[in-house]
Amino acid sequence: MNHNVMMAQAQAQAQVFQTRALPKKTDNAPQYDGKLKDDLELYLFATEKFYSEFRDLMNANTSESVDMIFCNFGPVVRTFLREVSHSLTRVDGIRDPLTWALCKDRLRPRFRDEHDTKPKRLNPVPCLLTCDGTERNQVRAIVGRRERKGATFFKVRWYGQDEPDTWKPVSNMTQAQGLIDEFVSSTMSPVHSRS
C-alpha cells in the first residue's frame, strides 16, 4: 500500500514539473563564460537569486535545474559540464543526475583563480613591509638588470605604486635578496662546452 502511495506522489510531482513553465534565456539571466575576470561566486549567487522561484527544483536530486541554467554558460563551461555529466555514469550504465549542488561543487575548483584566494576588493590595497619602524612597499618581482658606473641596478616591479617599475641599486635591495637570486639564476645562459 505504501508503494502505491509513493508511486502516486512521484507521478504527481512529475506532472507538476512537466507543466511548470521553465524560464527561457533572457538578457537578465546571469551569464558565466569561465574567464578569470569573471567572479564565479557572484555568478552562483546571482543565478540562485534569478531562479529563486524554482528553489525546490534546484534543491531536488535531479538534473533539471542544471538543464534549465545550461544555456547561460559559455562554451568552455558547457564542455566542462558535459564531461562532468558523462563521468557520472556508473558501472551498471545508469547515469547519476548532475544536480545544482554537484554542479557548484565541480565548478568551484575548476574555474576559481588559484592565485587569487583573497576576496575581491574595489580598491587595491598595497602590500606594505614594516622595516625599521617605517612602512615600505613590497617588491613583486625583479624584471631587469643593468650595470651603471660600476654599480649593479635592478628593475623592480612593486605592489601598490603608481609607477610600477623602478631601477634600484643592489645596495638598497637587502629585503629582496631571494628575488634577486631567482632573477639571476633564471637569466643566466647555460654554458656550452666545446667537444
Image (spheres, rainbow, N blue to C red):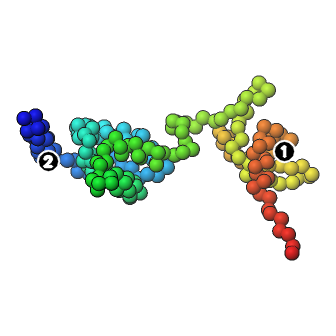
Residue at the location (36% across, 45% down)?
103
Q: CA distance from mark 2 to mark 1?
A: 72 Å
Residue 73 place in picture, x, y as percent: 35, 52
Q: Which residue is mark 2?
A: 18
Q: Are marks 2 and 1 in contact (CB under 8 Å)?
A: no
Residue at the location (10% across, 34% down)?
2
Residue 20 place in picture, x, y as percent: 15, 44
User: In which quadrant of the rendered image does the N terminus lie?
Assistant: top left
Q: In front here: 122 or 116?
A: 116
Q: Which residue is mark 1?
A: 170
Residue 23 appears in the figure:
yes
Q: Which kind of residue does numbered mark 1 sit on?
A: Val
Q: In front here: 10 or 78?
A: 10
Q: Which kind of residue does numbered mark 2 sit on?
A: Gln
Residue 168 place in picture, x, y as percent: 80, 45
In terms of secondary structure, where does tag 2 sit? helix
Q: Quadrant of residue 115?
A: top right
Residue 182 place in picture, x, y as percent: 76, 49
